[in-house]
Structures are given as structure tokens and as C-alpha cells.
Amino acid sequence: MSDTQTAIGIQPISLTPRAVEALNRIITEQEVPADHGLRVGVTGGGCSGFSYVLGFDLPKENDDQFEIGGIRVFMEKAHAIYLLGMEVDWVEGLNNRGFSFNNPNAKDTCGCGTSFSA
């Protein structure tokens, strides 16, 4: 099975090489337990209606599980409709440092880039 496929088909999201590098650095620095994976999802709120969820967590019953770039990824099945095709990147610039979300499903995004409307 490749990094972009699972038993159920194509991965719903992608992680850029810079994002994978940053996540691996965080895993090491924060000593994230081996049974945890990267949770990607959405929650209500933010200035545009939905905010992205990105953090380390244990798998839950309603999760789809993937491996992308060697990172275990958990996503609630219901969130796929909002995140399908999204790319997570890591940016480092003079005015911005952190994860960025390139989501083709977002109809509108806020200035901070962490919330969107669908």
C-alpha cells in the first residue's frame, strides 16, 4: 500500500514534505506517545464558520485511519466532506510561521487561514 492509498481508496488529505518534517520534529520534541496519531478535522467556530483541528490524539471509534509520509493520521469519517483534497503545509516566513491549509472545499477563508466556510 502506498502513502497515497489505503484499503478504501485515495487519501482524503495530503501533507507536504515540509509539514511531515515539522510534524516529526514536534513528535520528537513533545515526546508524543507511539499510540497517538495526527488528528485532522474541523470544528464549528472561527471567524468564517469552521476551524481546522490539528493535533495529536488517540484513535476513536468513528475515525478513518491513514498513513501519510510515515505519519499516522486520524480523521472522523463525517469530516471528510469538508477536508477532501486538502493539503497541509508548513510555512516559515517573516510574518507567518506554522501550518497552513489549502482546502479546495473552502468557499471563503479568514485572514488568519485557520477558519473557513463551506
Image: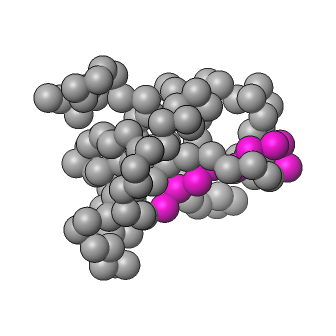
Using the image, determine if residue 100 lies above or below residue 12.
below
Residue 32 image offset from top left, x and y in percent? 32, 73
Q: How is the image coloured?
A: one colour
SS assignment for the magenta stretch, majority: strand
* Left or right of 19 on screen, residue 114: right
Using the image, determine if residue 114 lies above or below residue 8.
below
Residue 86 image offset from top left, x and y in percent? 52, 32
Q: Residue at x 14, y 29 (%)?
A: 1
* Left or right of 55 on screen, residue 93: right
Q: Is residue 91 among the parts visible in the rendering?
A: no
Residue 23 image offset from top left, x and y in percent? 37, 59
Q: Is residue 59 among the parts visible in the rendering?
A: yes
* Quarter of the image where the C terminus is located: top right
**Residue 66: within the magenta?**
no
| Residue positioned most to the top | 9
**Residue 48: within the magenta?**
yes
Q: Quadrant of residue 15?
A: top left
Q: Residue at x 43, y 29 (%)?
A: 12
Question: 63 or 39: nearer the eye?
Answer: 63
Q: Residue at x 30, y 20 (%)?
A: 9
Q: Which residues are magenta?
A: 47-55
* Left or right of 41 on screen, residue 22: left
Residue 33 image offset from top left, x and y in percent? 28, 73
Question: 63 or 48: nearer the eye?
Answer: 63
